[in-house]
């Protein structure tokens, strides 16, 4: 569980007066998530999810929340923010941006099956198709982000890890990112950010890493997250082919994207290895803070070195 900012009953009760969601009955921290403070909120009208946003600047929230609104308005299943009584999409609680959303049915996934991977492939392609009509705000240049963080972490790594890191950074830097189809993306579509009832998707959640960057990167993040088992360090190529084929039914990759897919998957693995290394070597403080083991993403990066091109 991650709770960086604690909230009292009276503080939350007062905040909820800015919404038309009824009276607060109880609330509890959510045993998931790493970078924000999340709570289940129960009122006399229903169950909601409250997020105190710790991971992004307040200035970026309109981009994120308007993206979610756009997707939901076009029938893509996702958790929608509830508007405050004054029409705004977020407020302030204990000096942190606060977003209230309806609670989706179902559960986040642990290890997804092939049917669920097929659904997420189609959904991600629909997401990219819908977002292509939006402005490319908040562009993130992934190699630059990785290089800046790697410079801080490099002295803390052993020689073997330094070599792996240097090679991955060179590969990521060799991609001409400006030539790839780009737009607003989720950028963090792990199985625990998709709510399912059996094989039916209830909706995508946790858009707080959303940014504008190549769609191929977003696809690579998703392939890595849905098809690599960290406990066994095994990449499920058949599941990856299922996810990719269903993605391409809606949005086929162009030849350049297809050629760059293996190296982009390694770049996506690098990005999350670095973020976990950052959390390990430079931990954030909070009431209850979750850290994920960086070894899993290091092993993913190694596993992808000789992966066959997914067709």
Image (cartoon, rainbow, N blue to C red):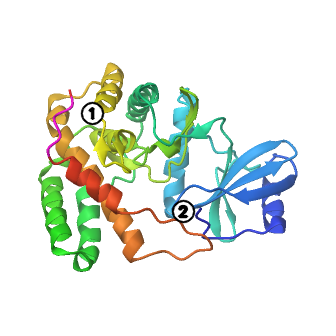
Instruction: Tell me the residue at 34%/45% (across/down).
Output: 221
Query: Which range is magenta?
Result: 306-310
Q: Residues within 10 Å of mark 2 (few under 14, many from 20)?
A: some
Residue 249, label in figure: none
Q: Residues within 10 Å of mark 1 (few under 14, many from 20)?
A: some
* Residue identified by numbered label 1: 237
Choose top left, top right, bottom left or bottom right for residue 44: top right
Q: Nearer the viewer, mark 1 or mark 2?
A: 1
Left-right relation of 58 to 215 = right
Name the residue nearer the viewer: 280 or 187.
280
Is residue 148 shown above or below 179?
Answer: below
* Residue 308 % position (x, y): 16, 35
- Which is the main secondary structure of the residues drawn in magenta? loop
* Residue 94 % position (x, y): 69, 71
* Residue identified by numbered label 2: 58
* Residue 24 % position (x, y): 85, 54
* Residue 284 % position (x, y): 49, 74
């Amino acid at each position: 569980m991650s709770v960086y900012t604690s909230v009292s009953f009276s503080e939350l009760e007062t905040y909820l007066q800015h919404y038309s969601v009824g009276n607060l009955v109880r609330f509890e921290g959510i045993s998931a998530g790493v970078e924000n403070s999340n709570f289940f909120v129960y009122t006399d009208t229903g169950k909601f999810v409250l997020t105190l946003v710790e991971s992004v600047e307040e200035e970026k929230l309109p981009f994120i929340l308007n993206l979610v609104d756009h997707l939901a308005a076009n029938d893509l299943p996702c958790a929608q923010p509830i508007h405050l009584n004054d029409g705004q999409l977020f407020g302030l609680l204990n000096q942190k941006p606060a977003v209230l959303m309806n609670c989706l049915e179902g559960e986040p996934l642990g290890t997804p099956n092939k049917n669920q991977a097929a659904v997420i492939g189609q959904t991600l392609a629909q997401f990219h198709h819908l977002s292509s009509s939006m402005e490319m705000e908040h562009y993130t240049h992934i190699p630059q982000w990785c290089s800046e963080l790697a410079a801080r972490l490099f002295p803390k790594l052993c020689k073997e890890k330094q070599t792996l890191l240097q090679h991955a950074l060179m590969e990521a830097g060799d991609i001409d990112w400006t030539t790839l189809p780009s737009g607003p993306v989720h950028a963090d579509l792990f199985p625990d950010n998709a709510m399912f009832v059996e094989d039916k998707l209830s909706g995508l959640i946790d858009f707080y890493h959303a940014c504008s960057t190549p769609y191929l990167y977003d696809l690579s993040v998703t392939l890595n997250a849905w098809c690599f088992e960290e406990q066994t360090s095994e990449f499920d190529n058949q599941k990856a082919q299922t996810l990719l084929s269903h993605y391409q039914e809606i949005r086929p990759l162009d030849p350049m994207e297809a050629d760059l897919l293996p190296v982009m998957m390694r770049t996506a693995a690098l990005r999350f290895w670095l973020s976990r290394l950052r959390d390990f070597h430079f931990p954030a403080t909070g009431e209850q803070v979750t850290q994920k083991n960086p070894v899993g993403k290091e092993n993913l990066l190694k596993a992808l070195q000789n992966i066959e091109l997914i067709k």
